[in-house]
Amino acid sequence: MCPASEASNESVRRLGSYTTAKITAGRVERVERHVARLRRDAGRLGLPLPPRAAIEDLFLTCAAKTFGKGDGIVRIEWSHLPSEAPELIATPRAYADAGSEWRAATSKTVHPGPEFRANTKYVDVSAYDLGRAEIKASELNEVLLYDANGHLVEGAASNFLVVTRDDRITTPARDLGPVEGLGLTVLRDSHPEIQEAHLTRQDIATCQELMSTNGVRGLVPITHLDDHPINNGQPGPIAKALGATFNA
């Protein structure tokens, strides 16, 4: 059904995963990849796999009903209440332009690490909620979540790409527990030179470029971190090249 109540409005939190697609002129961008991602994550969590056709139909129906030929966002989750079977839930919302360059800050929240989520986009992670609250209370676009050992893991709503001072294009290693996001997957498919790494605060403080990526926003350069400019406050050449890859 679309629209549906947000899972967070329920007194008992739901269990499962979700994927969020951008709707452009009524078209669900990369719908096949979102379908495959939701089924992949269900398998990782030990849930029965939702039918491909049902996911795609819900995406298309919800987008058409809510946005027509316009733009927006549709989130579909495959989740369940304790002791109940999982179900597909669609939640549409407006798409707000967040700009082509972002400001970010180091989060006060400590990332919990891999836990049980197997790099899935899980519906109930308190660290993400706290990080998003920090963003909402500020003029930031994203926050950086570090684990207890001081390694960068991910953002409240995106993965990161980091061009280190020795010219490597890196992303936080999967064994640290980041979501294996669709935006990052798209970029890694075309850029095998992207390496996984355990990145420290010092690595980020001395990096040449810092970028955010997810399936809705694509790739966005972060030009200011903790009120300090990165690459003189300008998008760098790697961000421009990777952004063109994603948009293509």
Image (tube, rainbow, N blue to C red):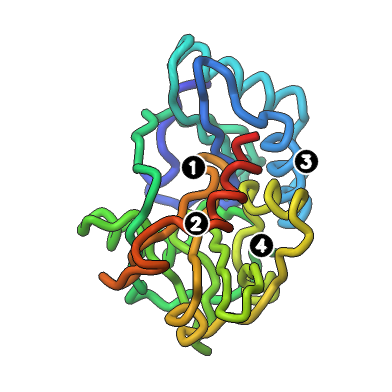
Secondary structure beneath label 2: strand
Residue under the point 60% across and 18% down: 60
Helix, strand or loop at disc 4? loop
Mark 1: amino acid: Arg
Q: Are marks 2 and 3 in contact (CB under 8 Å)?
A: no
Type of amino acid under label 4 = Asn
Crowd tier of the residue under label 4, counting other residues whose Cα lies within 10 Å: few below 14, some 14–19, many 20 or above: many
Residue count near mark 3 (Cα–Cα under 10 Å), binned few <14, some 14–19, many ≥20: some
The vertical placement of 21 against 188, above or below, is above
Circle 1 crowding by C-alpha within 10 Å: few under 14, some 14–19, many from 20: some
Residue 68, x across and y down, in percent: 47, 10
Classify residue 138 as left or right of residue 234.
left
Q: Is residue 72 visible?
A: yes
Q: Quadrant of residue 175?
A: bottom right
Q: Secondary structure at mark 1?
A: loop
Q: CA distance from mark 2 to mark 3?
A: 29 Å
Q: Position of residue 114 (x, y in %)?
A: 62, 73
